[in-house]
């Protein structure tokens, strides 16, 4: 039998060949589908600090509304919040830099907001009817999610009160202090700032103008513990503190205390034991320092122009963000480290919230219109406080 005259294949052979060909075609189609899915998923996955593409220019300042095909839903906390509609960010903002929604204390609009990474409102307080007869809600300064993620604790510094607000019911469920009245006795404060709720429901707050740090038992209206001497505003912790304006939890169980008078930062525990203190140079008014990682911290210079800087426990500055011109900070009030290494910054008097990439020193995300106050969608008016939605919130990390 020559190569030109082969025997015709049997029907069984033809059938087997057809099955093989069909299997190869099916595998090719599946491979193409999987490759497409992987490409889309990879494109939508937030980048890590080592692989993140660095920006070459800051986010612009004009809005670019572009409604996504589906609403955003956040359900990592025990509650589920949803947003839909057009984006409210400035042009060039990268959605992947935020791990989830953020909480904003919009001080001069007298409101709290939770927005998604696209800048769309998911929750707001107070809405019409949220306040009981006779209740007020003025100048929220700092706001943080409680450890269970169901409530928000708010320090209304200029109103001398602390509130706890239930997210689901939109109701004030606890108040410490009398609105508009300062003092140092039971149920009185003098400019509380950075109030936190502990896991057992107790409240810890720096009381700035009383120059003390106080612990309030769950549901109580008198302090159960005090660090510092009332009215003695000198850096000598734990006996006295110079205008404490921040006290944030650390990874080792201690707290990082910020003293505005003298620009001091202290690590201490709730018994008053001080591990170290550092005085920061080239800072006008230090504000609310946070831990990034062991022996690396971030703080704010609450000034105009302001700055964000990182430092170690010896007070050595490791990185500084102090841009000039249109991007200059104006009375910034808080910087929070994000999981990808960026910083979420409250640029208060510029009426905006920004994310700064410390590898490039560029703004990579912005909500609010630079130097333009407002109350409509996409606008803020002197925002002062921030937190990231659970499980990345200050008290849940």
Image (cartoon, grey):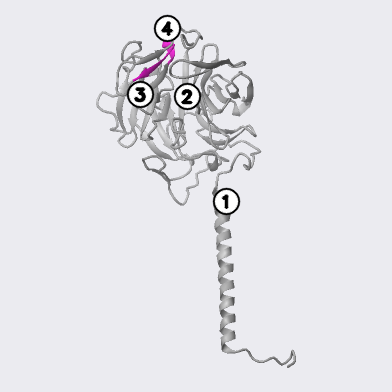
Q: Which residue carries the number 2 mark?
A: 248
Helix, strand or loop status at disc 1: helix
**281 sits to left or right of 258:** right
The numbered mark, 4 or 3, whose residue comes first in the sequence reads 3
Q: Is residue 173 above or below residue 265?
A: below
Q: Secondary structure at mark 2?
A: strand
Q: Give coordinates of residue 128: x percent, y percent.
A: 30, 33
In space, the residues marked 2 and 3 are separated at their CA atoms by: 15 Å
Residue 269 in view: yes
The x and y percentages for residue 271 are 43, 16
Q: Residue furthest left?
A: 133
Task: Give the spatial CA distance, label 3 vs label 1.
Answer: 43 Å
Residue designated by label 1 = 42
* Disc on res. 202: 3
Pointer 2 or 3: first along the chain: 3
Give me the C-alpha separation between circle 4 and circle 3: 24 Å
Q: Earlier in the sequence, mark 2 or mark 1?
A: 1
- Which tag, 1 or 4, sits closer to the chain's start? 1
Q: Residue 231 — which label?
A: 4
Q: Residue at x 64, y 34 (%)?
A: 359
């Amino acid at each position: 039998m020559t190569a030109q005259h082969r025997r015709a294949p049997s029907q069984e052979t033809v059938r087997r060949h057809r099955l093989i060909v069909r299997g190869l075609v099916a595998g090719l189609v599946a491979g193409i589908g999987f490759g497409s899915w992987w490409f889309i998923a990879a494109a939508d996955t937030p980048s890590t600090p080592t692989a993140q593409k660095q920006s070459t220019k800051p986010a612009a300042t004009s809005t670019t509304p572009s409604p996504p095909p589906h609403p955003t839903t956040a359900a990592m906390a025990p509650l589920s919040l949803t947003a839909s509609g057009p984006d409210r960010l400035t042009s060039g903002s990268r959605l992947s830099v935020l791990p989830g929604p953020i909480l904003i204390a919009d001080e001069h609009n007298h409101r709290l907001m939770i927005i998604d990474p696209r800048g769309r409102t998911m929750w707001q307080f107070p809405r019409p009817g949220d306040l009981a007869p006779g209740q007020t809600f003025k100048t929220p300064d700092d706001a943080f999610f409680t450890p269970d993620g169901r409530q928000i604790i708010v320090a209304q510094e200029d109103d001398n009160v602390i509130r706890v607000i239930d997210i689901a019911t939109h109701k004030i469920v606890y108040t410490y202090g009398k609105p508009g009245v300062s003092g140092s006795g039971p149920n009185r404060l003098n400019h509380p700032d950075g109030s936190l709720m502990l896991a057992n429901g107790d409240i810890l707050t720096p009381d700035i103008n009383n120059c003390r740090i106080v612990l309030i038992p769950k549901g109580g209206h008198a302090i159960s513990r005090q660090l510092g001497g009332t009215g003695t505003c000198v850096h000598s912790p734990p006996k006295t503190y110079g205008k404490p304006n921040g006290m944030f939890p650390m990874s080792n169980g201690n707290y990082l205390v910020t003293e505005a008078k003298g620009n001091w930062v202290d690590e201490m525990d709730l018994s008053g034991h001080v591990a170290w203190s550092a005085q920061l140079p080239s800072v006008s008014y230090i504000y609310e320092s946070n831990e990034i990682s062991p022996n690396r911290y971030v703080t704010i210079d609450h000034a105009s122009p302001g700055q964000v800087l990182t430092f170690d426990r010896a007070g050595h500055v490791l990185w500084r963000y102090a841009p000039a011109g249109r991007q200059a900070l104006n009375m910034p009030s808080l910087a929070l480290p994000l999981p990808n290494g960026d910083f979420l910054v409250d640029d208060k008097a510029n009426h905006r919230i920004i994310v700064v990439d410390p590898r490039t020193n560029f703004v990579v995300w912005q909500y609010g219109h630079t130097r333009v106050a407002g109350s409509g969608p996409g606008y803020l008016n002197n925002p002062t406080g921030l937190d990231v939605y659970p499980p990345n919130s200050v008290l849940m990390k």
